[in-house]
Image: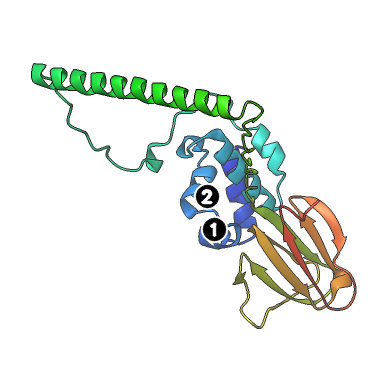
């Protein structure tokens, strides 16, 4: 069975529509359809196709890493669908003899000015050196900004072993409004986002996975936990 057929079959088995999957995984319906059609050239680069495939597969309960290994290893051409539109053609600059002559005069004037400036600076440094021979110029160190850490989306799975009320907020958006949702025993649901906040009315019967890694039960009683790519193990 091809990758796309496996995804479509599992989605149909779970009774989900493309729009429902798109809302839960934050992957556009266009990309989901491309994955189910094995149209990996729809994506700008293989790394995007692999990332979306792994997220979609895990959401459906499939082995995302196994499906990624089944992807064709051939070359990949950039997707035309992601273009930014027609490129504006700029008029070419035509150089004429008077323009070349004027440009030469400008360059000559600039070179002379630079030479004169270097002479002035050299004379000033020599004068300062004679006045204070023991003075040492100190060059302040330039602080190097640390590169910003880019947050990545994670897939959080919620499995309950009893009837449990939960409330979930993904990237600031409440998934079930203010009233939350009651899950039947044995239910498994998935959420994809950068920052997730989950509240369970029966934490001991609520088990969490992050990107396929089992974190165990949320705790005891009523518990609220937050998950992100920085806090997840």
Horizontal relation, residue 159 to residue 180: left or right: right
Local SS, label 2: helix
Where the N terminus falls, by quadrant?
A: top right
How many other residues sit within 10 Å of disc 1, few (<14), some (14-19) or many (≥20)?
A: some
Label 2 and label 1: CA atoms lie apart by 7 Å
- For the point 22% across and 34% down, the residue is 89
Q: Is residue 75 visible?
A: no
- For the point 55% across and 62% down, the residue is 23
Q: Is residue 233 visible?
A: yes
Horizontal relation, residue 87 to residue 28: left or right: left
Front-most of 155 and 22? 155
Where residue 145 appears, as percent x and y from the top left, is 62, 43
Would you say the residues marked 2 and 1 are in contact, meaning their CB atoms lie under 8 Å apart? yes
Q: In terms of image quadrants, where is residue 88? A: top left
Q: In terms of image quadrants, where is residue 15? A: bottom right
Which is more N-terminal, label 1 or label 2? 1
Residue designated by label 1: 22
- For the point 27% across and 39% down, the residue is 86
How many other residues sit within 10 Å of disc 2, few (<14), some (14-19) or many (≥20)?
A: many
Where residue 169 appears, as percent x and y from the top left, is 65, 70
Where residue 127 appears, as percent x and y from the top left, is 50, 26
- Is 108 drawn above or below residue 213 in the view shown? above
Outermost residue, bottom direction? 179
Horizontal relation, residue 233 to residue 108: left or right: right
- For the point 27% across and 37% down, the residue is 87
Residue designated by label 2: 32
**Residue 158, disc:** none
What scheme was used to colour the molecule?
A: rainbow
Local SS, label 1: helix
Front-most of 29 and 155? 155
């Amino acid at each position: 069975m091809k990758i796309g057929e496996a995804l479509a079959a599992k989605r149909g088995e779970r009774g989900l529509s493309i729009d429902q999957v798109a809302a839960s995984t934050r992957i556009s319906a266009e990309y989901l359809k491309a994955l189910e059609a094995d149209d990996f050239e729809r994506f700008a680069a293989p790394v995007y196709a692999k990332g979306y495939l792994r997220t979609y597969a895990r959401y459906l309960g499939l082995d995302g890493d196994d499906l990624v290994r089944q992807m064709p290893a051939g070359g990949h051409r950039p997707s035309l669908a992601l273009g930014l539109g027609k490129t504006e053609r700029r008029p070419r600059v035509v150089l004429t003899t008077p323009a070349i002559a004027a440009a030469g005069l400008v360059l000559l004037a600039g070179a002379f000015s630079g030479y004169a400036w270097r002479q002035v600076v050299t004379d000033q440094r020599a004068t300062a050196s004679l006045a204070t021979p023991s003075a040492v110029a100190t060059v302040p160190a330039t602080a190097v900004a640390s590169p910003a850490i880019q947050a990545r989306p994670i897939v959080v799975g919620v499995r309950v072993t009893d009837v449990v009320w939960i409330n979930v907020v993904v990237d600031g958006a409440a998934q079930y409004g203010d009233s939350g949702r009651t899950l039947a025993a044995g239910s498994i649901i998935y959420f994809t986002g950068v920052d997730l906040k989950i509240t369970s009315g029966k934490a001991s019967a609520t088990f969490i996975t992050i990107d396929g890694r089992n974190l165990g039960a949320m705790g005891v009683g009523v518990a609220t936990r937050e998950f992100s790519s920085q806090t997840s193990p």
